[in-house]
Amino acid sequence: MEFNYVLDLDDTLVNTTKDMGGDNSKARQVTLVKGASEFLSLHGKRTSILSAGVVTLQDQKIDALYLRKLVKCIIVVSSPERKLQWLSTHVAAKKMAGERVIVVGDRLDHEIQMGNRLDCITVRMRLRGAKYSYNEPQTALQYPNFTVQDFEELLKLKFDL
């Protein structure tokens, strides 16, 4: 079975909490987390980045990391609700093609819950010191299939669910 990835940007691909510390003027100074470059070189053609936030700020991070050249598509939406809308359309199309979607994100109440609701494989990125890394699941839909601390760990996972 073919897998497609949907990755969150902030505190997943980039340790935004650490790199920016709440200072939006540092958006062009962000770096990819450990193992992300290798992951994208292996899986970028089957990877979409889905991020919610101020488009101009997210674009600054995306451009600083040259992500447009590394992945299949990048979607920046204004709210988590729009993230769910895009993801549900994307997942439906992949399921019709006999493919599975793996959703990777830091937020239990956003990416993990959305992915579980859509019957995706979910991976929680729990970066050290990231804003939501200490949150614990509050509902059954917030439990990820896997939890990793960086992309090196993600690359070692076997998705035989």
Image: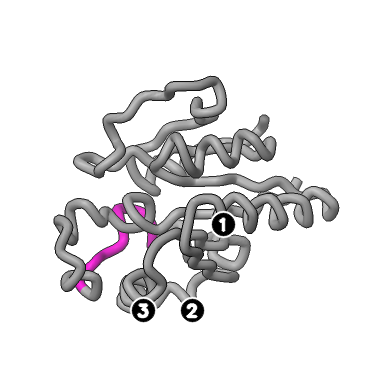
Tag 1 and tag 2, C-beta contact below 8 Å: no
In the rendered image, residue 30 lying in the magenta stretch gets the answer yes
Tell me which residue sits at (54%, 20%) in the image: 140
Q: Position of residue 149 (x, y in %)?
A: 33, 39
Question: Mainly helix, strand or loop, the magenta region?
Answer: loop
Quarter placement of the C terminus: top right
Q: Position of residue 28 (x, y in %)?
A: 24, 75
Q: Amino acid at mark 2?
A: Lys
Magenta part of the protein: which range? 29-37
Looking at the rendered structure, the secondary structure element under dot 2 is: helix
**Crowd band around label 3 with a 10 angstrom C-alpha radius: few (<14), some (14–19), many (20+):** few
Tell me the kind of residue under disc 3.
Asp
Instruction: Decide if residue 87 is on the left or right side of residue 44.
Output: right
In the rendered structure, the answer to whether residue 88 lies left or right of residue 38 reads right
| Residue at numbered disc 1 | 82
Distance from disc 3 to disc 1, alpha carbons, whole Å, reads 22 Å
Name the amino acid, label 1. Answer: Arg
Q: Is residue 120 above or below residue 36?
A: above
Which tag, 1 or 2, sits closer to the chain's start?
2
Residue drawn at the location 24% of the way across and 70% of the way down = 27
Spot occupied by residue 108 in the image (x, y as percentages of width and height): 44, 35
* Residue that label 3 marks: 63
Q: Which mark is residue 36?
A: none
Which residue is disc 2 drawn over? 69
Q: Which quadrant holds residue 107?
A: top left
